[in-house]
Image (tube, rainbow, N blue to C red):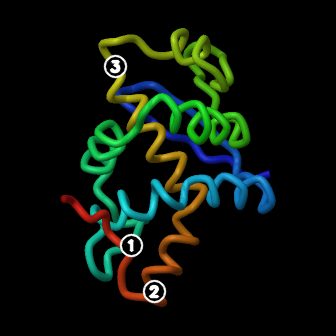
Amino acid sequence: MQTETFIINGQEYTCIKMNAFEGNKLLLRAQKIALPVFGALFGAGKKFSETDISEAAKLISENVDEHIFENLILPLFDEAKVYCLKNKKTIKNGTDINQCFSIDNLYDLYTLIFLVMRYQFAPFFDSLVGRFGSLPSEEKA
């Protein structure tokens, strides 16, 4: 089982690589959200794995709503077994988030969301960019 460690503002988090079936279910759920949002961030030819973490966390914080959080992010965290070392807690619901984050470090949560998504899906998105040159970007009216 592949494990990745993320250090965000001195706090350590880990997650595992999801299996293909569960990862695909979440990717299908994320398609309408992730492709336009990340497409706007990547630009032509830029890879997911090369994306600026701060920019991505900001973009996620601007585009996530309660529905996305409940139906995409929490299931992603659960499937990836996202774990906060300081609190010795697997993050899979709102209570776990409250125990691992405060209102003062919510930006760290968005950074963690991006890092987990990048760890899980960078090869997929990078493959899309390699084949098509860029991801579709969100049209702003």
Of the numbered discs in the image, which one, if any, rests on residue 47? Answer: 1
Q: CA distance from mark 2 to mark 3?
A: 35 Å
**Does 40 sit above or below residue 74?**
below
Compared to residue 77, the image places residue 39 above or below, namely below
Secondary structure beneath disc 3? helix
Q: Earlier in the sequence, mark 2 or mark 1?
A: 1
Mark 2 is on which residue type? Gly
Residue 73, by quadrant, is top right
At a point 47% along the width and 47% down the height, the residue shown is 115
Q: Which residue is mark 3?
A: 105
State the image coordinates of residue 97 (x, y, percent, origin top left). Answer: 54, 18
Element on which disc 1 rests: loop
Q: Crowdedness of circle 2 by 10 Å Cα count: few (<14), some, many (20+)?
A: some
Q: Is mark 2 in CB contact (under 8 Å) with mark 1? A: yes
* Label 2 residue SS: helix
Mark 3 residue type: Asn
Q: Residue at x 59, y 41 (%)?
A: 72
Q: Which residue is mark 2?
A: 130
Pick the front one: 66 or 122: 66
